[in-house]
Amino acid sequence: AVYMQIFLRDSVIDHNDLYAPIISHGKPSIAKINGKSKANVPLLKALRSLQDLTSFLNSSNTITQAAIVAFFSNLADVGLHGSMMYYLKARFHFDKNHFADLMIISGVAGTVSQLFLMPIFAPTLGEARLLSIGLFFHCVHMFIYSIAWSTWVPYAAAMFSILFVFSQPCIRSIVSKQVDPHEQGRAQGCISGICSIAHIVSPLAFSPLTALFLSEKAPFNFPGFSIMCIGIASMISFVQSMMLRVVPPILS
């Protein structure tokens, strides 16, 4: 926040909208805005935000496809994080030390990938192809978890993070290049909103499924079935990314 206050300058200033302070110390008054009281302003803003989201998603086929990819990839990612520890604890009796090792492996591999590999591959392969590569290995990563047969398998699967970390930056970059420079905030905000919806839906869908197949009441003996279903959600995003056709970026 200090850096923004000192160094960043807004290049687009709308003097018509910036006539009032953001924080008012006075007592709020109920004024009329286009015949409606200010008490209805939050509702009007919510409706307008929903209209903006709908119009943004319908603005181009590329953005619609990218939104679908973002939803299902985040649905799978959050589902895996919410279910993996319970699954590994029940399957291989993992404890906090094992989980810490997995986090270190995934974190280091992802950091190295984004610092060194992505700057090399993105210009040569293109972001759409790199997105598909990342989502493909995301699927493989989850399927290996679901059928893990030994304690070393989760450690080997964690190494795939060196490739599947490509997906989220590529989605953001693809969406960024489809809109005007002054619409970047709205575009990234809409994608973040879609990802947040996936963060809400994922635990509701996959946590009960994980609990069921790790219990004695499981319909059949497959402890990793919920992880397999999460991998199918990731597979949907991968298939959609293969159909993604990126148009030339908007420069102005």
Image (cartoon, helix red, strand yellow):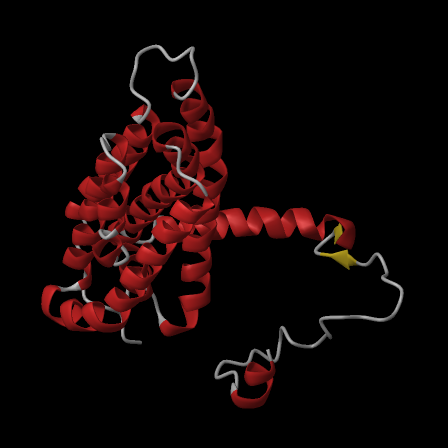
Residue 109 versus residue 244: which sits nearer the camera? 109
Res 235 quadrant in image: top left
Return the residue nearer the eye: 217 or 163. 217
Among all residues in the image, which is located at the extreme right? 27
Could you tell whether 164 is left or right of 204 in the image? left
State the image coordinates of residue 156 (x, y, percent, origin top left). Answer: 22, 47
Q: Is residue 15 visible?
A: yes
Q: Position of residue 197 (x, y in %)?
A: 47, 42
Most distant residue in the bottom direction: 6
* Rendered view: 39 above or below 173: above
Residue 222's place in the image compared with 242, above or below, is above
Question: Which quadrant of the figure has residue 162?
Answer: bottom left
Query: Which residue is located at x 27 percent, y 75 percent?
Result: 251
Q: Can you see residue 54?
A: no
Q: Residue at x 19, y 62 (%)?
A: 127
Taking the view exactly as shown, the residue that stands out farthest to the left is 124
Residue at 69 percent of width and 77 percent of height: 19
